[in-house]
C-alpha cells in the first residue's frame, strides 16, 4: 500500500495538494480536520467535545482523534491502494498509534512529505482563506498564531519520529499549485 502523510503547518496547502495526489495515485484522503468539522456539523457528542478545542486553536485530545482514525481505517482498508493522511498525526502519540494501527493491518507509512512555508506567508494565506472558508478559526489572527505555535511545539516532533526511520522528505510549499504538486509527485516516486 502507498500510505503517505502530507505534513505541514496550518495553511501550508495540505488539503489542496491532497485532493490532487488522491486522484493521481488512487488514494483515500483522510483529513482529521474535515472529519472533526463533519462531526461538529452533525452535533455528535464527539463533535461537540472537539469544538471547544478547535475554536481556541488547540489540539483535540489524542484519544478522540485516534479512535476516529481507527474507525476510518477499518471502514476503508479493503477498498483502497493506500491512504493520504492530512492533518494527522499531529502529536508523537498519534504517530505511534497510527504506526500500530497500520502494523496490525500488515502495512506501514511509506513516507512523510513536509511542505515548507514561511510563517508570514501562512498568516497571509489563512486570513485570506478566512474571508471565504466560513471557518471561525481562520478569522482571528490570535487563533491562527496559536495554531502555528501548537504546530511548532507539538507537531514538528512527528517529523523527527519519521525522520529517524528515514521516511521524512521536505518539499517547498511556496510557488504555484502545479509546481508544488509536481515536486510532491517526484518525492512520492522517489520513495522505495
Ligand atoms: P489547519 O491545518 O488549517 O489548522 P485542520 O482542518 O487540519 O486545519 O484542523 C483544524 C482544527 O482541528 C485544529 O486546529 C485542531 O483543533 C483540530 N484537529 C485537526 N486534526 C487534529 C489532530 N490530528 N489532532 C488534534 N486536533 C486536530
Image (cartoon, helix red, strand yellow):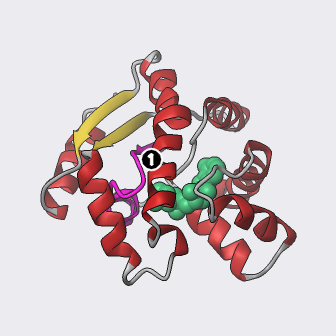
94 relative to 163, above or below: below
Residue 24 lies, in percent from the top left, at 31, 61
Q: Quadrant of residue 25?
A: bottom left
* Residues drawn in magenta: 1-24
Residue 50 within the segment the image draws in magenta:
no
Residue at horizontal 24 percent and vertical 40 percent from the top:
171
Q: Ligand 1: which quarter?
A: bottom right
- Residue linked to disc 1: 148
Q: Residue at x 39, y 45 (%)?
A: 8
Residue 141 visible (yes or no):
yes
Q: Quadrant of residue 98?
A: top right
Quarter of the figure with the C terminus: top left
Label 1 residue near ligand 1, CB within 8 Å: no
- The answer to whether residue 31 is visible is no
Report the residue that reaches farthest toward the top. Answer: 164
Position of residue 176 measured from the top left corner of the image (x, y, whole percent): 13, 61
Amino acid at each position: 500500500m502507498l500510505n503517505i502523510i502530507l505534513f505541514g503547518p496550518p495553511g501550508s496547502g495540505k488539503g489542496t495538494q491532497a485532493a490532487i495526489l488522491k486522484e493521481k495515485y488512487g488514494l483515500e484522503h483522510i483529513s482529521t480536520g474535515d472529519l472533526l468539522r463533519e462531526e461538529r456539523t452533525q452535533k455528535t457528542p464527539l463533535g461537540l467535545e472537539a469544538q471547544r478545542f478547535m475554536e481556541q486553536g488547540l489540539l483535540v485530545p489524542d484519544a478522540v482523534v485516534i479512535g476516529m482514525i481507527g474507525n476510518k481505517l477499518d471502514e476503508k482498508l479493503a477498498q483502497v491502494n493506500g491512504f493520504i493522511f492530512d492533518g494527522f498525526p499531529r502529536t508523537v502519540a498519534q504517530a505511534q498509534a497510527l504506526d500500530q494501527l497500520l502494523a496490525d493491518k500488515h502495512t506501514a507509512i511509506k513516507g512523510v512529505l513536509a511542505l515548507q512555508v514561511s510563517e508570514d506567508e501562512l498568516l497571509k494565506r489563512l486570513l485570506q482563506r478566512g474571508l471565504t472558508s466560513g471557518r471561525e478559526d481562520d478569522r482571528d489572527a490570535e487563533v491562527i498564531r496559536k495554531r502555528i505555535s501548537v504546530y511548532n511545539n507539538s507537531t514538528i516532533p512527528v517529523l523527527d519520529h519519521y525522520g529517524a526511520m528515514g521516511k521524512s522528505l521536505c518539499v517547498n510549499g511556496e510557488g504555484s499549485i502545479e509546481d508544488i504538486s509536481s515536486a510532491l509527485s517526484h518525492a512520492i516516486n522517489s520513495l522505495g
